Image (cartoon, rainbow, N blue to C red):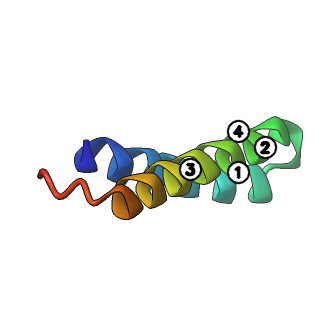
Amino acid sequence: MNLLLIIAGIIAIVLLVTGGLIEAVNFLLYVGIVLLVLAVIIFLIRALSGSRRV
């Protein structure tokens, strides 16, 4: 699950950079923000719930 969060975070950062550089594909900016927010929420839920399984 942690690998999935890392991959989602990397994709989110790449989409944010791409969306910021290429104005024609502005929707990628929003997709990146949504993925980043989801990754952070899932990480916080796992961290606060005490789930330490790797």
Crowding at dot 3, Cα within 10 Å, few <14 / some 14-19 / many 20+, comes out as: many
Distance in Å between CA atoms under marks 2 and 4: 4 Å
> Which residue in the protein does label 2 denote?
30
- Helix, strand or loop at label 2? It is helix
Is there a contact, CB below 8 Å, between mark 2 and mark 4? yes
Earlier sequence position, callout 3 versus callout 1 = 3
Whole-percent x, y for residue 9 in the image: 46, 54
Distance in Å between CA atoms under marks 3 and 4: 7 Å
Distance in Å between CA atoms under marks 3 and 1: 7 Å
Distance in Å between CA atoms under marks 2 and 3: 9 Å
Crowding at dot 1, Cα within 10 Å, few <14 / some 14-19 / many 20+, comes out as: some
Q: Nearer the viewer, residue 38 or 11?
A: 38
The amino acid on which the numbered mark 2 sits, given as a three-letter code, is Tyr
> Which residue in the protein does label 3 denote?
12
Q: Nearer the viewer, residue 2 or 24?
A: 2
Is there a contact, CB below 8 Å, between mark 3 and mark 1? yes
- Helix, strand or loop at label 1? It is helix
> Which residue in the protein does label 4 denote?
31
> Which residue in the protein does label 1 denote?
33
The amino acid on which the numbered mark 3 sits, given as a three-letter code, is Ala
Earlier sequence position, callout 2 versus callout 3 = 3
Q: Is residue 11 left or right of residue 23?
A: left
Q: Is residue 27 left or right of residue 44?
A: right
Q: Nearer the viewer, residue 21 or 11?
A: 11
Residue at 88% in and 48% down: 23
